[in-house]
Image (cartoon, rainbow, N blue to C red):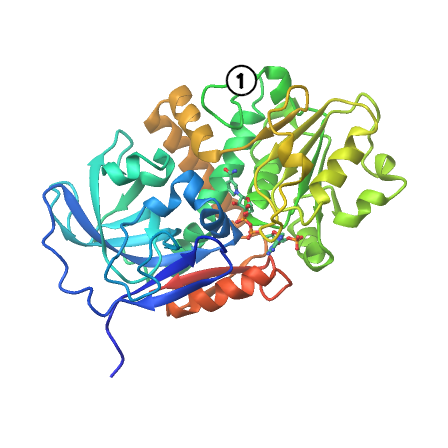
């Protein structure tokens, strides 16, 4: 008979490429649920290279603190200094509740444990309808509110019956929000207060936000966060605030996919940085504002592109969103972040969202975001050529992680990995 023991995903904190899905034979019975808590079990999860960031920077940014350590794990996995649990975006279900506002069967969208082990959340309702915040000391002390917010759906919502739409949300919604935030607030037009890409109330002027007639260059453009920004730039702007060009840069393997999205004015390769006529291809002169956004530029591409794009002498802004997960050397581009006069800034969607909530009010912020997401799905199908690849077993998370880590095309940009467990 197959084991019914829950299984969880663990990462070697010193090397995110080493990870495993392990069973917990002694997990049951679970302790009684405390008042004010709900017990959730993950149902739909997703995997992109964004999850690698949670593992790589998990100590620094608190992502290993989201779920409690489990001393009952067998050795060596019981060593919490060496192994940690990260999270995946998706849907869970309240399988028990000791909270008056959350009936059993409620579905929750948010930051979830990877595996089949139920976890307890201490939650309080928020101003935005249907939103809950996890308020346990372990989480609030270490992670940003972005990761502690859950959106609830009534118990009669059947995730399996709406699997396509729910899978798409698991895969894309938080990444879409990053693109949405950059487009709407960091590149705000005159109708809205511009917000610094790192949030925290840092100053960001209308001039810095202005991308009218600018050339935007996106490195690692085929990824889901980048596509979301490109989608918003093309479809969610009004009037004169369109950039002159939005340019995708990526590998040969992703080129055809990126071209077919129809979201970019040019699709170039990382090595095209050495083209002698790059300024002509991009229509750059010394008055042209250039914005370089690094999503997942491979190897030293961010440094090479930053240096070349500065050559014509126009105003230059660099935004560090993410990076090549296999490149452990930070490179000059990242080192330039916030250096006086460099024009290079860190992007943090979670803290940018905090500032946007302050600017709009919480309920309005989520109302506008929901509208943008609905238009993204209803008008443009949301996928831009990505197909969901469904797995029914959490064991596949481990092999998929290995495949994605190799970064050499086992899973191209057209594949969206989702898990129904
Ligand atoms: N700062 C923020 O607030 C924020 C918010 C959201 C996401 N992010 C970050 O943005 C980055 C992109 O995340 P995502 O989930 O959108 O990415 P994704 O969809 O998994 O993007 C994959 C793309 O990245 C490129 N890539 C470069 N190195 C790769 C490797 N070793 N393995 C696989 N693909 C590689 C590939 O394009 P090519 O083949 O063309 O190179 C690939 O198509 C991550 O670093 C993520 O953490 C940051």
Could you tell me how many numbered marks the image carries?
1
The secondary structure type at the circle numbered 1 is: loop
Q: Which residue is drawn at 37% across and 34% down?
A: 144
- 325 relative to 250 in the view: left or right: left
The quarter in which the C terminus is drawn is: bottom left
The quarter in which the N terminus is drawn is: bottom left
* Viewer-proximal residue among 30 and 360: 30
Which residue reaches farthest right? 276
Q: Position of residue 270 (x, y in %)?
A: 75, 48
Q: Position of residue 269 (x, y in %)?
A: 76, 50
Q: Is residue 344 visible?
A: yes
* Viewer-proximal residue among 140 and 348: 140
Q: Is residue 131 visible?
A: no
* Viewer-proximal residue among 70 and 296: 70
Is 127 placed above or below 170 here?
above
Classify residue 62 by image quadrant.
top left
Q: Where is residue 258 in the image (x, y as percent from the top left)?
A: 67, 52
Which residue is identified by label 1?
Answer: 191
Task: Indicate if the residue with disc 1 has its beta carbon within 8 Å of ligand 1.
Answer: no
Q: Which residue is drawn at 68% across and 36% down?
A: 332
- 371 relative to 338 in the view: left or right: left
Is 121 placed above or below 315 here?
below
Which residue reaches farthest bottom? 1
- 336 relative to 56 in the view: left or right: right
Q: Which residue is drawn at 84% across and 27% down?
A: 312
């Amino acid at each position: 008979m197959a084991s019914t023991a829950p299984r969880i995903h663990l990462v070697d904190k010193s090397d995110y490429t080493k990870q495993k899905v392990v069973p917990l034979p002694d997990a049951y019975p679970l302790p009684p649920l405390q008042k004010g808590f709900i017990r959730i079990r993950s149902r739909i999860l997703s995997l992109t290279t964004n999850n690698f960031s949670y593992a790589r920077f998990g100590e620094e940014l608190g992502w290993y603190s989201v779920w409690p350590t489990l001393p009952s794990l067998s050795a060596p996995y019981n060593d919490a200094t060496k192994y940690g649990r990260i999270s995946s975006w998706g849907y869970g279900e309240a399988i028990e509740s000791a909270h008056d506002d959350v009936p059993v069967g409620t579905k929750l969208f948010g930051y979830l444990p990877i595996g089949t082990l139920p976890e307890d959340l201490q939650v309080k309702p928020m101003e935005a309808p249907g939103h809950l915040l996890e308020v346990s000391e372990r989480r609030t002390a270490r992670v940003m509110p972005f990761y502690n917010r859950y959106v609830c759906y009534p118990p009669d919502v059947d995730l399996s019956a709406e699997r396509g739409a729910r899978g798409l949300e698991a895969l894309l919604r938080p990444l879409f929000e990053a693109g949405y935030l950059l487009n709407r607030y960091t590149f705000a037009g005159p109708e809205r207060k511009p917000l610094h890409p790192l949030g925290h109330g840092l100053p960001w002027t209308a001039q810095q936000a202005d991308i009218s007639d600018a050339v935007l260059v996106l490195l690692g453009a085929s990824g889901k966060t980048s596509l979301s920004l490109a989608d918003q730039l093309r479809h969610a702007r009004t009037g004169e605030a369109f950039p002159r060009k939005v340019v995708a840069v990526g590998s040969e393997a992703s080129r055809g996919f990126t071209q077919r999205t129809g979201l970019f004015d040019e699709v170039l390769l990382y090595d095209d940085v050495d083209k002698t006529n790059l300024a002509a291809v991009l229509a750059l002169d010394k008055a042209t504002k250039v914005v370089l956004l690094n999503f997942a530029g491979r190897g030293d591409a961010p440094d090479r592109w930053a240096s070349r794009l500065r050559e014509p002498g126009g105003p230059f802004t660099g935004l560090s969103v993410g990076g090549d997960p296999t490149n452990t050397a930070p490179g000059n581009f990242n080192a330039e972040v916030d250096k006086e006069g460099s024009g290079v800034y860190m992007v943090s969607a979670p803290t940018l969202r905090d500032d946007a909530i302050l600017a709009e009010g919480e309920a309005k912020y989520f109302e506008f975001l929901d509208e943008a997401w609905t238009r993204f799905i209803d008008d443009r199908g949301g996928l831009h050529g990505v197909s969901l690849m469904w797995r029914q077993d959490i064991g596949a998370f481990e092999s998929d992680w290995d495949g994605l880590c190799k970064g050499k095309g086992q899973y191209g940009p057209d594949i969206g990995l989702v898990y129904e467990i």
